[in-house]
């Protein structure tokens, strides 16, 4: 072959091919740019956000905390911070608009948005938010110092699991100051919540866009603020992990074994529901794996039972509902096992709390309308007009997420999909309205526990279709059903994506109002902490702290960083104040009848609370402190920018500082049948656990195995009845 035969000859066809190749290279460059664009935008937004909040105050950067008004932190944040949050949200939607499931990038983007929304206060403020966090640190300090827990000091110490765990870990690690831990706990908690929630999302039948959008919604509508250093924040993570394990390792989507006859309206409706495509994925694992996860489930429930009053009931309701709706392979023995655990803890371990106060435990049963009113209307009435916008924003987020959840449920039903698990997780917490008022906060807890189901269904309002193929090829598909005609599917997907992005941006901005709207009195300053430290340094052998209230008996929790140390030595008492700051008669009278080591603490946080919630004048705080300084019977023993501590110049001759009261109060009362009840508890738990382990091998078992199950039930049922009877007997005998 001649040497020149290998030389290509340019023809019109080859020239056209070369020209066509140029756009291909350009498309490759564009595709590469689209791959790197989302992470670059996310990192840029994150850096912009940190710099906007941490540098010196200015028109577009920095935060001046003195500018905070009735709408909270948003009034002091620079515009650059809002732009940074929107930039990160845009980057997230650019990622999910692509046809690949970039899990790690999406997790990073949601974590960045979580940092921006839930870590704002930790970035700006020097002290931990929420005054109640300090008393929780005081519980840990008390357990570390005394080695015991006493419900007589505080009812929360009847559920000391979280505080005892933190006390053990911090003592083992040599940590004595919890300030930094308390400061960053809200952010760390929300990052922790994402892990089990993402595991829950992996068990639903949905497109990649729907799953990740639900995860984003979970971050931007969680404004409740129960993620701080508290038992509730800790046990909420346990609740999510519990639900994730039940769905992942014990999930079931089997149809009804015997089809229901289509006779009657209810039966026809149930038959149609049974015919829907399950909205959950089945997941089969080995017997040993499920046995281990069963032990983990019981351990999680026991930890929640020992740590919090409400969370175990939410876990029990979710488990029972999943079994009832045939979305879990667990038997009915486990709810009885766990329910008996809750009753036993209340009956045997919290006697100091309910003994003689049965009404506090069961007084809210059935008062649904009253509990609802105290959690909605009562929180708006009497508020500062500007601060009322914050409360309306919170109710608005709740209304939007519930409306979207209803729309998502409807759109999925039109596609023939039944999302039983998500609907159950949304509805079960509402039953708590009939249990207790929980200090006027039961509505907040219901919203918190309903969020997982609400966010999943709300995501379906924008992305209701079913996935086709694998996660690496998440093209959408729609079951063929009547009235399910879509015009231009690609255009519909783009419009849905734009609507979802707009909704997320609006909710993210409203979140800042709802979450940080109380910052004028929820923020804790260094001088307020220093004022309380002065009291701790002078509380030998005991002390009293007077905090300001507009009405005696209504404000149980002080708006001061109280109880961080020496919780058993200091008593916190209310003192009445008037809208006229010069009116000090009630303050002086209270101090006159108090023993030495009684201190009046006047802080910026208390004044902000009185102003926003009870209509006190905006200049009330400086005028009140000026009146205290000018009073001839008072002396100021501590002075700070945001706090001052006062006491009487002289106390009556011969007055002595009393010794602190005994925290233990002796042994708990008992009843005649208590020893028998304890034995019945042990027998019941062993029998029910054995019954559940036998069932893990599957429903189709040998005759010998079925006989074993029946024999176990012959032991478990009488023991269970006896254990419950003794619990009831204890409530009657001890509580009367």
Image (tube, helix red, strand yellow):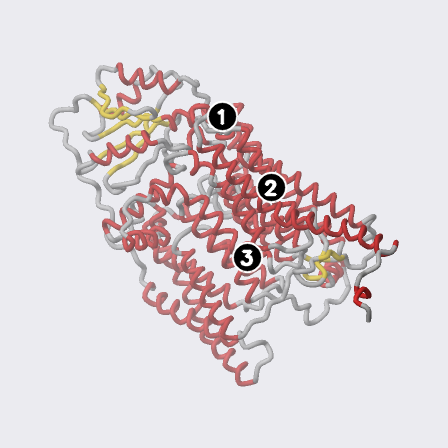
- Mark 2 or mark 1: name the one nearer the start of the chain: 1
For residue 268, which quarter of the picture? Answer: bottom right
Q: Which residue is mark 1?
A: 70
Figure quadrant of the N terminus? bottom right
Mark 1 is surrounded, within 10 Å at the Cα level, by few (under 14), some (14 to 19) or many (20 or more) other residues, namely many
Disc marking residue 39: none
For marks 3 and 1, give the one nearer the viewer: 1
> Where 167 falls versus 134 (above or below)?
below
Outermost residue, left direction? 654
- What residue lies at 58% left-to-right and 64% top-to-bottom? 323
Instruction: Residue 427: tell me if it is visible.
Output: no
Which residue in the protein does label 2 denote?
89
In the image, residue 392 lies at what x, y percent? 57, 32
Q: Position of residue 656 (x, y in %)?
A: 14, 32
Q: Residue furthest right?
A: 12
Task: In this rendered view, identify the residue nearer to me: 283 or 375.
Answer: 283
Q: Real-space Cα distance between discs 3 and 1?
A: 38 Å
Q: Give the side of residue 187 with respect to residue 568, left or right.
A: right
Q: Label 2: few (<14), some or many (≥20) within 10 Å?
A: many
Secondary structure beneath label 2: helix
Residue lying at 38% horizontally and 57% vertically, measured from the top left = 347
Task: Point out the tag, 3 or 1, that comes first from the N-terminus.
Answer: 1
Real-space Cα distance between discs 2 and 3? Answer: 32 Å
The answer, for residue 727, to whether it is visible in the render is yes
Q: Is residue 431 left or right of residue 149?
A: right
Q: Nearer the viewer, residue 335 or 357?
A: 335
Residue in the foreground of this view, choosing between 733 and 137: 137
- Tell me, for residue 318, which label it has, or none: 3
In the rendered structure, the answer to whether residue 670 lies left or right of residue 460 reads left
SS assignment at label 1 = loop
């Amino acid at each position: 072959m001649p040497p020149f035969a290998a030389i290509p000859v340019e023809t019109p066809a080859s020239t056209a091919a070369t020209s066509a190749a140029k756009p291909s290279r350009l498309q490759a460059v564009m595709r590469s740019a689209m791959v790197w664009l989302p992470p670059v935008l996310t990192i840029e937004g994150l850096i912009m956000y940190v710099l906007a909040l941490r540098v010196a105050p200015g028109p577009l950067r920095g935060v001046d905390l003195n500018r905070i008004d009735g709408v909270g932190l948003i009034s002091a944040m620079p515009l650059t911070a809002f732009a940074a949050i929107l930039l990160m949200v845009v980057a997230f939607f650019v990622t999910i608009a692509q046809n690949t499931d970039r899990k790690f990038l999406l997790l990073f983007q949601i974590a960045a948005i979580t940092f921006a929304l839930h870590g704002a206060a930790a970035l700006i403020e020097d002290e931990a938010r929420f005054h109640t966090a300090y008393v929780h640190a005081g519980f840990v300090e008390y357990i570390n110092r005394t080695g015991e827990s006493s419900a007589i000091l505080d009812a929360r110490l009847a559920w000391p699991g979280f505080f005892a765990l933190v006390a053990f870990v911090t003592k083992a690690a040599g940590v004595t100051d919890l300030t930094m831990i308390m400061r960053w706990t809200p952010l760390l908690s929300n990052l922790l919540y994402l892990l089990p929630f993402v595991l829950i999302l992996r068990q639903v039948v949905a497109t990649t866009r729907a799953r990740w959008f639900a995860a984003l919604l979970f971050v931007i509508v969680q404004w409740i603020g129960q993620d701080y250093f508290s038992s509730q924040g800790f046990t909420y993570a346990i609740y999510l992990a519990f639900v994730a394990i039940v769905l992942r390792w014990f999930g079931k989507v089997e149809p009804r074994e015997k089809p229901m006859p289509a006779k009657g309206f209810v039966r026809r409706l149930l038959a149609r529901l049974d015919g829907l495509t399950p909205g959950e994925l089945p997941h089969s694992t080995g017997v040993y794996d499920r046995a281990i996860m069963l032990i983990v489930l019981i351990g999680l429930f026991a930890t929640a039972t020992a740590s919090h009053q409400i969370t175990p009931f939410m876990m029990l309701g979710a488990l029972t509902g999943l079994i009832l709706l045939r979305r879990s392979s667990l038997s009915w023995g486990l709810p009885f096992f766990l329910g008996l655990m809750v009753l036993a803890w209340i009956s045997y371990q919290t006697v100091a709390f309910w003994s003689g106060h049965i009404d506090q435990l069961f007084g809210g049963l059935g008062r649904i309308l009253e509990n609802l009113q105290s959690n909605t209307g009562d929180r708006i009435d009497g508020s500062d007009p500007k601060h009322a916008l914050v409360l309306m924003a919170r109710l608005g987020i709740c209304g939007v997420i519930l409306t979207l959840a209803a729309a998502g449920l409807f759109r999925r039903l039109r596609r023939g999909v039944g999302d039983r698990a998500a609907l159950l997780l949304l509805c079960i917490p509402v039953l708590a309205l009939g249990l207790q008022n929980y200090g006027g906060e039961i509505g907040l807890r219901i919203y918190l526990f309903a969020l997982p189901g609400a966010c999943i269904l709300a995501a379906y309002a924008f992305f209701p279709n079913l996935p086709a193929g694998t996660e690496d090829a998440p093209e959408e598909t729609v079951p063929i059903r009547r009235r399910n005609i879509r015009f231009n599917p690609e255009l519909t997907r783009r419009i849905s994506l734009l609507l979802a992005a707009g909704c997320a941006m609006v909710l993210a901005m409203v979140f800042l109002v709802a979450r940080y709207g109380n910052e004028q009195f929820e923020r804790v300053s260094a001088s307020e902490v220093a004022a309380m430290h002065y009291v701790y340094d002078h509380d030998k052998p005991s002390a009293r702290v007077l905090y300001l209230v507009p009405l005696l008996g209504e404000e149980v929790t002080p708006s001061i960083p109280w109880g961080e140390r020496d919780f058993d030595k200091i008593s916190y008492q209310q003192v009445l104040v008037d809208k006229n700051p010069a009116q000090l008669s009630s303050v002086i009278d209270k101090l006159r009848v108090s023993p030495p080591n009684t201190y009046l603490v006047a802080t910026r946080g208390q004044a902000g609370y009185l102003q926003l919630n009870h209509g006190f004048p905006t200049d009330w705080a400086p005028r009140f402190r000026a009146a205290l300084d000018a009073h001839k019977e008072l002396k100021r023993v501590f002075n700070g920018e945001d706090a001052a501590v006062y006491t009487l110049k002289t106390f009556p001759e011969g007055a002595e500082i009393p010794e602190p009261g005994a925290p233990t109060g002796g042994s708990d009362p008992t009843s005649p049948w208590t020893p028998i009840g304890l034995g019945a508890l042990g027998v019941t738990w062993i029998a029910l656990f054995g019954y559940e382990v036998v069932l893990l091998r599957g429903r189709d078992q040998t005759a010998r195995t079925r006989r074993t199950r029946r024999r176990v039930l012959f032991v478990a049922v009488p023991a269970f009845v006896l254990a419950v009877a003794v619990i009831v007997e204890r409530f009657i005998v001890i509580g009367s």
